[in-house]
Image: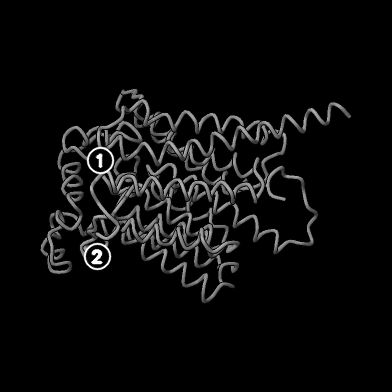
Amino acid sequence: MMRRVSTRKDIDALKMLAIFFFITTFALKVFTDGPYLRGEISSSIAYLKYATALIACLFGFCIVIKSGGQIFKHEFADLLGIMAIFLLSSSILQAIAQTVSSTVYVELIKLAMPMVLSYCMLNCLDEKTIYKCFEIILVLSFIAYLIDLSSEGVSLSDIMRADFLSSDSPTEHAGLSDISLVLSFFFLFYSNKKWPAVLSIIFCLLTFKRLAMIMVLLVTIIAVLFPHLRYKNISHKLIFLSKIFSLLAVALWFWILLPEQERFFVDLFKETPFNFTSGRSGIMRWLLDSHFSSYGFGSINATVKPLFGVPFEMDFIKIAIELTPFTLVCFIWLFWNITRDNVWPYLIVAFYVLNMITSDCLNSNFSFTLAYMVIGIVNYQLEKKRELFMPQQDAGGFE
């Protein structure tokens, strides 16, 4: 009897530590990114969030070992498939280039971090605790957003100067846009309280990233006017078509940015590719003209950032050039699989896919952590609703 009590206390202690370091990770993320970009703090402080994320993973994983980790199991397997393909492709390319770069493995670890962290948190915390954690993250993120605006001399009244067509607003905040959108998905799905949903929606709109703004308005309309759609599943055929469309869209975007299509591009968008893509097409053309030789994941940014001062910000094209088109096909295929044919996860994945075609978000490790957690929570809840006849298992997570 005494042994059981001790074990229960040990598990509770591990959960409290996992919660503490999980919250601390996001507090460090939202409060240090802005000062780091402004040169106010050192990189060692800014990157401390990865250490706390690792500690949270370790405490969470101790509980996962005991519970079996049934929540987010299939989605995690698909994500691990992506990691395996990226690692294999990078290893082959390094062997061909006869180069071993620590940059590649650092980037791979950063890519894996949100997958592992979300899996551990989903399987060691119950649903109410996750809800409270998300509330805290929302409040901390919004406070950090206001601090960043104040540090840059921007007031919320400046929102009146926003120009949606040119995606220009003094209140824009790329670093918190994805986080605010994912939080909106979460609170609009549960609808337990109104204030988190309202605050997360306003927060997302204020950060002024066009695709995120469109998506948050779409999911708000669904949650308010058609709430039953949140619990619907979608056909395998739609998922398959989404995969094909994603591949075709990447191919088309790549083709239209080539120098041979510049006149067509200008006629279509009334701007040059360079201006329309904020210089990304120029970096792409440089990579093609210079006959860039990849040595694995992260090698493009390691090459172009010292030359151009910015990374290459078109994720799918970067994967195709850096890790081969076959790796891109595998990534898109497995990434869509994590929706498990449910509407809410489908919309989250659709947002990231659309973003990765023309922009970058693959390095948004912490928004991906929250996104994977929301996808896992929704898939688990909907699976429970549809399979009530199945015996319940003690998964150590949601109850």
From the top left corner, tell me how far across and down residue 136 is, in percent: 52, 47
- Of helix, strand and loop, which one carries label 1? loop
CA gap, disc 1 and disc 2: 31 Å
Report which quarter residue 212 is drawn in.
bottom left
Tell me which residue sits at (42%, 34%) in the image: 108
How many numbered discs, if any?
Answer: 2
Q: Is residue 48 left or right of residue 99?
A: right
- Of helix, strand and loop, which one carries label 2? helix
Q: Nearer the viewer, residue 379 or 29?
A: 29
Q: Nearer the viewer, residue 144 or 373?
A: 144
Tell me which residue sits at (31%, 40%) in the image: 34
Report which quarter residue 295 is drawn in.
top left
Which residue position holds label 1? 311
Quadrant location of the N terminus in the rendered image: top right
For residue 215, above or below residue 71 = below
Q: Is residue 228 left or right of residue 103?
A: right
Q: Which mark is residue 155?
A: none
Which one is in front in this view, the residue at disc 1 or the one at disc 2? Answer: 2
Which residue position holds label 2? 160
For residue 244, above or below residue 4 = below
Disc 1 marks a residue whose amino acid type is Pro
From the top left corner, tell me how far across and down residue 348 is, in percent: 47, 58
Of all residues, the one furthest to the left in this rendering is 263
Q: Nearer the viewer, residue 171 or 378?
A: 171
Disc 2 marks a residue whose amino acid type is Met
